[in-house]
Amino acid sequence: MDVRILDHRTPEERDRSFLPGAGKTWLLPFYDLFSRAVGVRALHERAAGLAGVEPGQTVADVGCGTGNLTFAVLAAQPAAKLTGLDPDPDALRKAARKARRRGLDLTLVQGFADRIPADDGSLDHVVSSLALHHIDEEGRSGFAREAMRALRPGGQVTIADFSGPSSDAEDAGHSAHAHGGGGHGRGRGHGRPHLRLRRSRPAHVVDVAGGHGEGIVTLLTEAGFDDARAVGEADMRFGRITFVRATRP
Ligand SMILES: C[S@@+](CC[C@H](N)C(=O)[O-])C[C@H]1O[C@@H](n2cnc3c(N)ncnc32)[C@H](O)[C@@H]1O
């Protein structure tokens, strides 16, 4: 078993802030509980299934947090080589503890989505769940460019993220802005737990996905990915999730 945490940050990145998984650092111990309670595990399993990782393939999980998508990928393909990337050292330590408990090999890297710790063309897969909406527009474009750089030709990117309100919320006529808030740029906090049970999504979700995954599809297409497309949707209690896949030409 080999579990390691590496610090990939430049001196400048050490001062760079980020929005943690549960919105506030002190809520991290509850993140997995929240996540389980709202059924996010099924989302991770579905994303892992869509990625279709084969034995021996290299995978970067960007914005891995406490490692739930990483572990779903490893459950689906135990012979995959996973690297989790996240700026949150506490989340990475938690992911490392979970990996050790499960007897898994895992490399965890402290860093940001717009600098993926991999050589050019070296990855078979980039996966990411519920992380892009934590990242501002510039960082998301940087992530797409980095995924393009780090994947080999034919490599795949698989993303699951917010794309709109759950149909419950739509039926109730709730607008995204009814809850106030606005987007969260780099360095700004949420002011409330991210995975709080709610009937409609937080306002910033619109900025991420642009409605039904189109935002993510556009992001990947602009970075040069072929055939970026939404391949599935899931209505969760906290909003609608779209699964997007694309191939590195
Ligand atoms: C809601 S959590 C999702 C965690 C995990 N992927 C999951 O599905 O449970 C969002 C994660 O994005 C991370 N994050 C925030 N800003 C980031 C950035 N610029 N680059 C990479 N990850 C970032 C947070 O630290 C957090 O762990």
Image (spheres, rainbow, N blue to C red):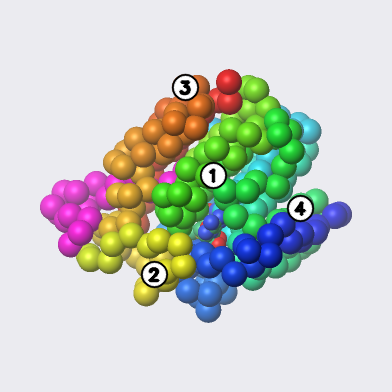
Separation of disc 1 and disc 4 at Cα? 19 Å
**First along the sequence among labels 2 and 4:** 4
Residue 219 vs residue 8: left or right? left
Quick check: is the Cβ at mark 3 less than 8 Å away from ligand 1? no
Q: What residue do we see at 42% from left, 69% from top? A: 188
Front in this rendered view, residue 15 or 69: 15
Separation of disc 3 and disc 2 at Cα? 34 Å
For residue 190, the mark is 2
Query: Of tags 1 and 2, which is closer to the observer?
Result: 1
Q: Are marks 2 and 4 in contact (CB under 8 Å)?
A: no
**First along the sequence among labels 1 and 4:** 4
For residue 107, the mark is 4
Residue 56 lies, in percent from the top left, at 78, 33
The residue under label 3 is: 227
Query: Of tags 1 and 4, which is closer to the observer?
Result: 1
Q: Could you tell me the amino acid type at mark 1? A: Phe
**First along the sequence among labels 1 and 2:** 1
Q: Is residue 120 above or below residue 83?
A: above
Separation of disc 2 and disc 4 at Cα? 29 Å
For residue 143, the mark is 1
Q: Are marks 3 and 1 in contact (CB under 8 Å)?
A: no
Residue 178 vs residue 147: left or right? left
Q: Which residues are magenta?
A: 160-178
Task: Provide the secondary structure element on which disc 4 rests.
Answer: strand
Q: Is residue 186 above or below residue 192?
A: above
